[in-house]
Image: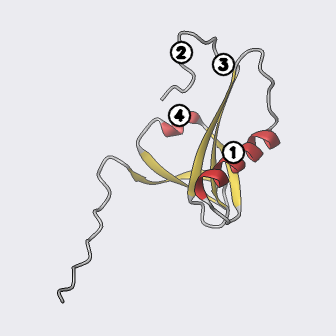
């Protein structure tokens, strides 16, 4: 997915891809992209991280401690589920998303 491709826009100066994850388990709760075009104010790493966490909290209702990992955008071009190795601070593939997730079993209805 090329998030910066548009015939109307100039080439971006910077593209940042980040994941926000549960700092204890490494489960990713939000993927965040920032594209900076010529003439736009560049953000510091701290500003990028703060905004990514703010967006993650607004979308997840998470009260757990969150952390940010900057990653290569190419990691997300394939249908793969990742988590973060919290000790090594890197993405780890959990599974490929080429198959449908397992169906949840329905609870049997009780007859009266």
Q: Earlier in the sequence, mark 2 or mark 1?
A: 2
How far separated are the C-alphas under marks 2 and 4?
A: 18 Å
- Residue 74 marker: 4
Q: Earlier in the sequence, mark 4 or mark 3?
A: 3
SS at mark 2 in the image: loop
How far separated are the C-alphas under marks 1 and 3?
A: 19 Å
- Give the mark count: 4
Q: Are marks 2 and 3 in contact (CB under 8 Å)?
A: no
Name the residue at 57% across, 55% down.
28
Q: Are marks 4 and 3 in contact (CB under 8 Å)?
A: no
Query: Residue 101: percent from the left, percent from the top?
Result: 32, 57
Circle 2 residues within 10 Å: few <14, some 14–19, many ≥20: few
Rendered position, 67 above or below 78: below
The C terminus lies in quadrant = bottom left
Location of mark 3 (residue): 12
How far separated are the C-alphas under marks 2 and 3?
A: 10 Å
Name the residue at 69% across, 59% down.
66
Mark closer to the observer (4, 3): 3
Mark closer to the observer (2, 3): 2
Q: Earlier in the sequence, mark 1 or mark 3?
A: 3
Name the residue at 60% across, 60% down.
26
Location of mark 2 (residue): 6
Circle 1 residues within 10 Å: few <14, some 14–19, many ≥20: many
Location of mark 1 (residue): 52
């Amino acid at each position: 997915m090329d998030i910066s491709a548009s015939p109307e826009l100039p080439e971006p100066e910077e593209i940042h891809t980040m994941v926000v994850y549960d700092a204890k388990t490494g489960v990713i709760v939000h993927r965040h992209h920032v594209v900076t075009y010529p003439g736009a104010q560049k953000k510091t790493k701290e500003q990028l991280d703060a905004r990514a966490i703010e967006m993650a909290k607004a979308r997840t209702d998470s009260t757990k401690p969150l952390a940010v990992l900057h990653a290569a955008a190419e990691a997300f071009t394939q249908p793969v589920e990742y988590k973060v190795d919290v000790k090594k601070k890197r993405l780890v593939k959990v599974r490929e998303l080429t198959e449908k997730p397992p169906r949840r079993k329905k609870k049997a209805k009780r007859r009266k």
